[in-house]
Amino acid sequence: MRFRHRAMAGFATLLLPLAGLVGLASPAEAATSATATYAKTQDWGSGFEGKWTVKNTGTTSLSSWTVEWDFPSGTSVTSAWDADVTSSGTHWTAKNKSWNGTLAPGVSVSFGFNGAGSGSPSNCKLNGGSCDGGTIPGDTAPSAPGTPTASDITNTSVKLSWSAATDDKGVKNYDVLRDGAKVATVTTTSYSDSGLTAGTDYSYSVQARDTADQTGPVSGARAVRTTGGTTDPPPTGDKVKLGYFTEWGVYGRNYHVKNLVTSGSASKITHINYAFGNVKNGQCTVDDTYAAYDKAYTADQSVSGTADTWDQPLRGNFNQLRQLKAKYPHIKVLYSFGGWTYSGGFGQAAQNAAAFAKSCKAVVEDPRWADVFDGIDIDWEYPNACGLTCDTSGPAAFRNLMSALRTEFGSNYLVTAAITADGSSGGKIDAADYGGAAQHLDWYNVMTYDYFGAFDADGPTAPHSPLTSYAGIPQAGFNSADAIAKLKSKGVPSKKLLLGIGFYGRGWTGVTQSAPGGSATGAAPGTYEAGIEDYKVLKNSCPASGTIAGTAYAHCGNNWWSYDTPSTIAGKMTWAKNQGLGGAFFWEFSGDTGNGELVTAINNGLN
């Protein structure tokens, strides 16, 4: 099940300031001072993971940074993230990305890499000066260019123009970014982009580079919609309203596709993620074949009102979804693979991404149900990080997997991914190239829930899905606003981010304090799992008594629960619209009431 979202305990690290490895530089200008420190965060014998942290220790802003060091022969960087790392012999150079070069006084940023060998870095330099806090050269990065204007828009092209950036030593060229990804580098202040898709939304921004190859801040974004194509919004609005339907819900939960009809939810959603397909031996595969395509439905259980026969070619959930789409043609269905339990197979899949993608398309396009699915969703928990198991496939593996899926499925299918919402510094969002992968995806389902829960048995009690931070939050960065902001900073367009809502609560027992922050003795009792309960149960058994950080909590006897209500969902949907997000999704349908209270709140809030 895809519930837990906690950061795993990290390896103990020893920060090693490389003071004394180099002499103090004597730059002509002293714009500020900064330090660069190194830590080996993991070591598996034949290789290791290293992390550099650059901190602005001065009183003025640092506009860009470059860290240089030497490795002994036989030690090298094999992959890196959050910096562009190159080498010349045994000398290594790391330059900031476009989004993390500017550091205000007192601010720090980290980048990491996987290495081979056993050596340690020496001869550290930061922007040509000392790594131990000495003054560094003050060549400033260029300013942000003006927000582009768009003209000559056709079905497949657009002309962009912008006002020039300024720089103390001159601007060399401009990078043109489409949906956060670079599509061209030009020396003028205009560019014509072509090969676009008709009737499609794009976002353009520009970034300048000076003669020292420093990049400045990104300009404001210009939204462009090409002409032609289908411009009519879906029947339920122009925002994505997506729910997860669990394959196993047809058993103990007794929740079936027909419940989407009887609850009124089917008319208020745009997409369904069918969860989960498995990932075995680097391949996509159907998990529970009986529930998926063999279980027979009687007339009263069926969406169509017609009973399944023993010899019909397709039964089960897939046939019920086919009937649902016939009744509600606006609904699109995606087959979701992975989840908390089945993510262990993605590491092997990433070793041959093309073969994995081919296997997934074969499942989605199986002739027995090829008309049921409109796309694929990947729920990898978590790339280059730890979930139920730990993955060490590297920061590029997720991006490569998404690229292979888009290549295999083409533009006629939806390709999406459910991803971590860990907005902490150096957390799971920083572990994989979510910014680079975004260009291949239609959207991300950002799992903005399960931040806190009784997996920390003694508390402190805290809402599992805080929208914002609050005084006393147990972990910085564990909230929706920080996660969304971090993904945007990595170049993911707002419209490709969906806010996640849990249709369940998380709770502790042994709690005497009503307000958040109390101690506990363990997990509160739950119908299916200790510490977890459906909204439809909690709304009556433990009604909400307060709100914090945009979500609700309740203290009943010695149990303490946090969960979203129609009221808090309304607030979250307003926030999502104000952020320009593409919509919202939820886990999962069966936690809602029989009349779909929470689905209704999402639909009303996004309209």
Image (spheres, helix red, strand yellow):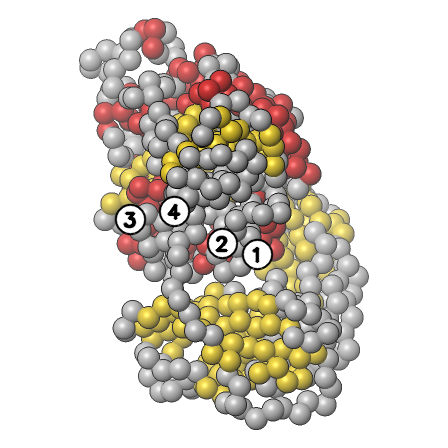
If you read the primary sequence from the N terminus, does the residue marked by circle 3 or circle 1 appear first? Answer: 3
* Image vertical order of residue 71 relative to residue 272, above or below: below
SS at mark 2 in the image: helix
Q: Secondary structure at mark 3?
A: helix
Ranked by sequence position, the earlier of labels 3 and 2 is 3
Give the label, 3 or 2, closer to the camera.
Answer: 2
Estimate the x, y position of residue 388 in percent, counting from the top left. 32, 47
Q: CA distance from mark 3 to mark 4?
A: 9 Å
Dot in front, 1 or 2: 2
Would you place residue 556 above or below residue 33 in this image? above
Amino acid beneath label 4: Trp
Q: Dot 2, crowdedness within 10 Å: few (<14), some or many (≥20)?
A: many
Kindly identify the residue that appears in the image at 35 percent across and 32 percent down. 530
Q: Position of residue 489 (x, y in %)?
A: 61, 55
What residue is pinned by disc 4?
A: 380
For label 3, the residue is 345
According to the image, label 1 marks what residue?
490
Secondary structure at badge 4 equals: loop
Write the residue at 29% across / 13% down.
297
Q: Which amino acid, by three-letter code, is at mark 2?
A: Ile
Q: CA distance from mark 1 to mark 2?
A: 9 Å
- Pick whichever, 451 or 81, lies toward us: 451
The disc at residue 429 is 2
Dot 1 or dot 4: first in sequence order is 4
Marks 3 and 4, the one that precedes in the sequence: 3
Q: Residue furthest left?
A: 310
Residue 317 shown left or right of residue 483 in the figure: left
Q: Residue at x 67, y 84 (%)?
A: 135
Q: Nearer the viewer, residue 359 or 110?
A: 110
